[in-house]
Each structure stands twice: as C-alpha cells, then as structure tokens.
Amino acid sequence: MAVAPSSTPSAAPSAVTVLGPAHPGPDVLAALTRAITGEDAHTVSWSAHAVPYVSGSPATAGLHRVRGITATGRAWSAFLKVLQHPRHWNRLHEVPQAHREGFLRDYPWRMELDAWQPAFGAALPAGLRVPALHRLVELGDDKLAVWMEDVEQDPAPWDDERFTRAARLLGAFAARRCGPAVPNPHGVPP
C-alpha cells in the first residue's frame, strides 16, 4: 500500500493508516533523518509502503519501507519492522489451547534485538553484517518499532557461485553462534 508524500510529519494521515502506532512523530522523524543522512536537515516529504510478506512469525506485526527527501534534496530510506508480543498475533488461535499459556509466557518476541549486541556482530564471519540500527521506539502494549537500514535486494539472479558463497557464510555463522560469546539472555538453547 502506498502513501502519498507528506509535506510535514503531522500532515500524513494516510501514513497513520499504513504505519499505525509506528507512525513517527516529528521528533522521531527528525532523529531518523539525522541518523540516516548524517545531516541536520529537515525532511520535507516522505512516504510509507507496507512490504508484502507471508510470515508465520508471531513476533512480526508489520514490515514497511519509508522514504523521504530532506530540505537539501537528499533522499533517504529506512526499513521499519514492528515487533509484537505474540498475544497480538493474528494466528494465535492456531496454537493449541493446552500450549497457549506457555507459548505466550515463554516466546522470546524481543530476541531479534540481540542482533545489534556487539557479541552477536563479533560472531559474524567476514562478509556478513546486520543492517544498521537507526532507532528503537517503544510503542506501548508490548509493541516495538525497529527502524533500520533499508537494504535493497540485488535484482540479479543467483548463480551457483552466489549460492555457494551464501551457504558458506551462513554455515560459518551457524557454527560460530553456538559459542559462549554469543548473547543468550532468553535462555533459549542454540
């Protein structure tokens, strides 16, 4: 869903529909613009688009791509992921009633944030990195807006060499993440 560009952060009523409680207020938008561009320039227009995805993840409330233009004419973009406690999940009814209470109590819905801990980044092999984290915004009611670097997917088709490189990097990471240096504050076994 596309949203018409807004001339001011508060004049984006259609963005409220797309982003819901994750809609950035003027202060958050200004901080994001500074974090992304490195400039203290005002964003003069911006738009938000829901990213279509099929996810069974109980912790994912939404994925969005947000793009803007500063007063100096510099374009910026961010990827917004809204995390949620699984009690908000629209498929919670699929969890058998006998297991639902434990699922809701024990599901580590904020565990994804561990990716930005220094020990996690240190465990990544050369050639892998996490997107830059621009800002975390607590939305209340056990929801969280994770504003991060917008990484555009390379449209080139994958060949055997690219698949091989990806498999080696992911395999190296899988081997490293079982070590004691990788944070595990949730107590979930690797």
Image (tube, rainbow, N blue to C red):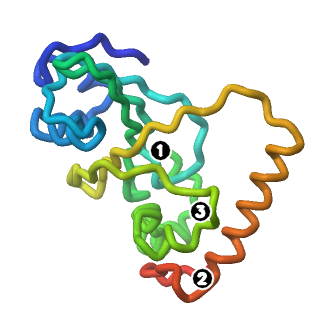
> Which quadrant of the figure contains the N terminus?
top left
Residues at discs 2 and 1 in contact (Cβ within 8 Å): no
Location of residue 186 (image quadrant): bottom left
Amino acid type, mark 1: Asn
Pointer 2 residue: 189
How crowded pointer 2 is (Cα within 10 Å; few <14, some 14-19, many 20+) is rated as: few
Residue 116: numbered disc:
none
Pointer 1 residue: 90
Residue 2: x and y, percent? 40, 15
Residue 96: numbered disc:
3
As helix, strand or loop, the secondary structure at mark 1 comes to: loop
As helix, strand or loop, the secondary structure at mark 2 comes to: loop
Q: Nearer the viewer, residue 131 or 37?
A: 37
Q: CA distance from mark 2 to mark 1?
A: 27 Å
How crowded pointer 3 is (Cα within 10 Å; few <14, some 14-19, many 20+) is rated as: few
From the viewer's perspective, is the residue at label 3 or at label 1 nearer? 1
List the single residue furthest toward the bottom: 180
Q: Earlier in the sequence, mark 3 or mark 1?
A: 1
Amino acid type, mark 2: Pro
> Which quadrant of the figure contains the C terminus?
bottom right
